[in-house]
Image (cartoon, rainbow, N blue to C red):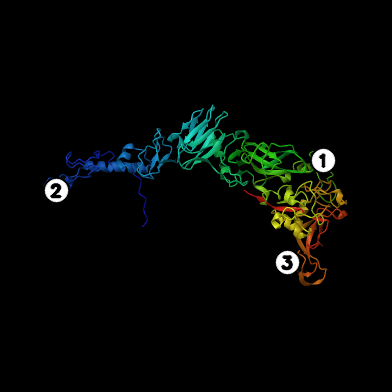
Amino acid sequence: MAIIRPTNLQKPFADSGTKNTIPIPSQIGVVNGAASYTDGFPPLTMTPIAAGGVPPAGPDFNGILNEISQHIVFQNAGGVYQYDSALATAVGGYPKGSLLLNLAGDGCWLCMADANSTDPDATNGSAANWMPINGTGMAALALTNVNITLTPAQFGKPFLLLTGALTGNVQLIMPALEKSWIVINNTTGAFTVTLKTSAGTGVVAVSGVCQIYGDGTNINSFGYAQLSGNASQVFRVDTAVGASDATPLAQVQSLVSAFNDPYGFFKLESGSPAFTKTAASTISIKAGTKIMVAGVAVNIAADTAVVMPALTAGTDYAIYACTDGTVRADASFTAPTGYTTETSRLIGGFHYGLVAPGTTVAGGSFATTGNGMIWAQADVDLIAGINVFSLWDLKWRAASSDSLLRAQKGFSFVNGLWVANYLCSTDHIANGLSKAGTNIASGTVLPKKPLAFGGDGTVTYPNMDWWTANEIVRAYGAKLMRESLFVDAAFGVTENQSIDATAATYPTTQRNAGYTSKYGLEQASGHHWTWGEDSSFRPDGTVGWAYNDVSGGRGQIYLQNTLGLVRVLLGGPRTNGVYSGSRCSYWDHYPWLAVWAVGVRAACDHLKLV
């Protein structure tokens, strides 16, 4: 049977009727037949009248029902009781779980122990075992150099606003409760505010907004999981970065998107990086970006210039958000100069390429005729200095889990994938998969084995066959390019030419005019074949299905003929003459062939998080 919700009472019983006030003490021997809360109706009202009894009085009935129904109407109207010392004494204290409205009427107290007679709103320190819940509003505390013990009315608020010019260090003595607070520290002066319990430890509030919690003994700062792996401890808004909300509370509320974001990194646009190239050597971070930095919430309310160091060609730079509210670039991928991992967070990066700022189409020998890309100055400007295609952030980056970013540094975003700007060096363990100014791994300049495939930082492969190339890139979460990707990534080179030089002419990854792609890939064609993912078949060789021992002693391959398996080569080597270009490919080499002219250029899947 369904329980039917009764109709709310709008008026106590006998609200305007004749009624008695029912006393607590017994009325036996005082008023014959009168009801009391001690006896109810006395025995005399249950004695026959013929035997000397008296009937119960109607006003007593009305009085009883009126007082009971007053409570029902109060509760039906959403009323919550406040502390009553007389009741606490009469019932031996409030039981655990009791809920009382606080004195200000803007929050509640939850009783945490049985037989609790203390007043939760008491300001003399006598309150005990009451937990503030459902509090609203902000407690304002003006500080100078005097320690303050918070009253229940103050620590019952969810927000604590600290103001004043500090003339000494100050302690705010918090209750030993399991509860959290948001502290808005707007004090000035070269002193600190420490929030702690009377007998426990505490934390120093940063300038701005910080979130703390009590564990019942001490006051602690909140931890916050970040993609970078640095644990946050507090958060704040730095108005220098454009937090223009009218009140501190509104500032906190405006950052809710950053706190709710699982990476502590929120941006308005998921389909592009959080940064914009504004000139050859400058970038800005987009408005609406909100970042948790070692517990600091930095709110970018307007497009804001990234603080830039002196930039060097062929170098990757990290972009950091810092606890002082600045966003800055640095060549260090640990922390920017003057900061630590506790005061900064890596949020992105870019590559400063080999096409110098100010380079023109003619001065850079970019193609203006032919069958390939016809360059305009706007195209050159995209890769001159800061390569716009290299900009990345925590939610717009290569899908590699390599902690040293060896499949991110020196990469450009090309139509949904990331591609290395440079040919891979022999020491990819130290250099990553794409770095300017390194040697070029090949069948005669042998690469090291990655640690993931049995390397020790010194031992090299015996050759540069397809399996070697594949292991090198796979070790860092990358892959070899398919032909379809290569023709996109190499688009922009001067077609139908090769550098036709000796190995001494380009012993390193460098810029040779005419061989730079639209996306900033250097030596993209006409220098070095690179292994691709695509497979094909060649019909020659010794015919007959059989196992062939061609994989370096790691299992045999069952082929129709001894040369039947082909892996594509891309781009063309330096001796290829007019055959090289963005669509140049070679479908003759079997994967166990290793020669001087073959190397590696890596690609990586794209990771876009919302």
Residue 544 is left or right of residue 17, and the answer is: right
Left or right, 61 with reference to 455: left
Residue lying furthest bottom in this view?
Answer: 544
Query: Residue 360 placed where, x, y %?
Result: 82, 40
Residue at the disc numbered 2: 48
Task: Count residues near mark 1 (Cα–Cα under 10 Å), then give few for <14, some for 14-19, many for 20+.
Answer: some
The answer, for residue 466, to whether it is visible in the render is yes
Identity, as a three-letter code, of the amino acid under mark 2? Pro
Residue holding disc 3? 555
Relative to 474, residue 276 above or below: above
The quarter holding residue 544 reads bottom right
Kind of residue indicated by mark 3: Gly
Q: Secondary structure at mark 3?
A: loop
Q: Are marks 1 and 2 in contact (CB under 8 Å)?
A: no
Secondary element at image label 1: loop
Do the CB atoms of the residues marked 3 and 2 lie less than 8 Å apart? Answer: no
Q: What is the x, y in percent for residue 325?
A: 62, 36
Pick whichever, 14 or 196, lies toward us: 196
Q: CA distance from mark 1 to mark 2?
A: 118 Å
Give the mark, 3 or 1, whose residue is nearer the N terminus.
Answer: 1
The residue tagged 1 is: 360
What mark, if any, has residue 97 been given in the picture? none
